Amino acid sequence: MAAVLNTFVNSFTKRLEPPVRQHLKNVYGCLSMSTLSATAGVYIHMYSELLQANLLTTLGTLGLLFALISTPDNGKNQKLRLSYLLGFAFFSGLGLGPLLQLVMSVNPSIIATALVGTTVVFMSFSISSLLAKRGRWLYLGGILISLLNIMVLFSFVNLLLRWSLFYQAHLYIGLFLMCGFVIYDTQLIIEKYHMGSKDFILHSLDLFVDFIGIFRYLLIILTQKEISKDQRKRRD
């Protein structure tokens, strides 16, 4: 085990220069803070009546996202931009509240399973991307965005057709795309740093969106499987 760990550390050190490693440390630090902020949002929605997910909180999420993107990093406004990021994450957690309440009504253990699964998947794809040759997976960007646009288009079509098979395919393809974006965004962050972009707050936003996306898809997929299993038991 120690030998495997040493091999991993050596490979990681050889692949990434010290400044890049420090930048990634800042990125993942912001990601951790964002995840905690989202957790607080979920808790407020589920266990407090102070704030509930609604249209206003959705507008707040979009407003904070726009504020973060439209406020360039000048080296002096990091605290302000970090507050935008954490606010966006908090409201994103609020937005997950209704889904999590539905999941708890089916089987509360699904939430823990989905969270562990998301963490394992996210870390696995992140590490594989970090250890890959620089820029190896950047070509995925065009493919992933094209597939995402197609999914959005067909989602609108399915609002009229209501095909359950298409909805199931949409879930699994969406999960696949989010995993692909983890690989792509991780390498893109490194490439942006080499091009002079050191905005670790904005870079962490991409990974946070990927993490939440994987978690949401896993929640829905696992919940549907649990409902199907219960229905089969009742028929038997």
Image: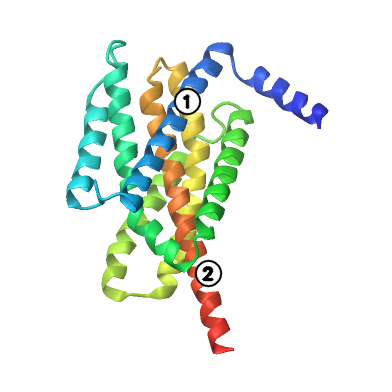
* Mark 1 or mark 2: whose residue is earlier in sequence: 1
Q: Quadrant of the N terminus?
A: top right
Most extreme residue toward the bottom is: 236
Q: Is residue 218 visible?
A: yes
In the rendered structure, the answer to whether residue 80 lies left or right of residue 119 reads left
In the image, residue 50 sits, relative to residue 161, either above or below, namely above
In the rendered structure, the answer to whether residue 23 lies left or right of residue 146 reads right
Q: CA distance from mark 1 to mark 2?
A: 34 Å
Where is residue 230 shown, x and y percent of the image? 53, 77
Look at the numbered disc 1 and give the secondary structure of its residue. helix
In the rendered structure, the answer to whether residue 236 lies left or right of residue 2 reads left
In the image, residue 125 sits, relative to residue 202, either above or below, namely below
Q: Nearer the viewer, residue 224 or 174?
A: 224
According to the image, label 2 marks what residue? 225
What residue is rendered at 38% in x and 49% in y?
146
Q: Nearer the viewer, residue 213 or 106?
A: 106
Three-letter amino acid code of the residue under disc 2: Lys
Where is residue 131 shown, x and y percent of the image? 64, 29
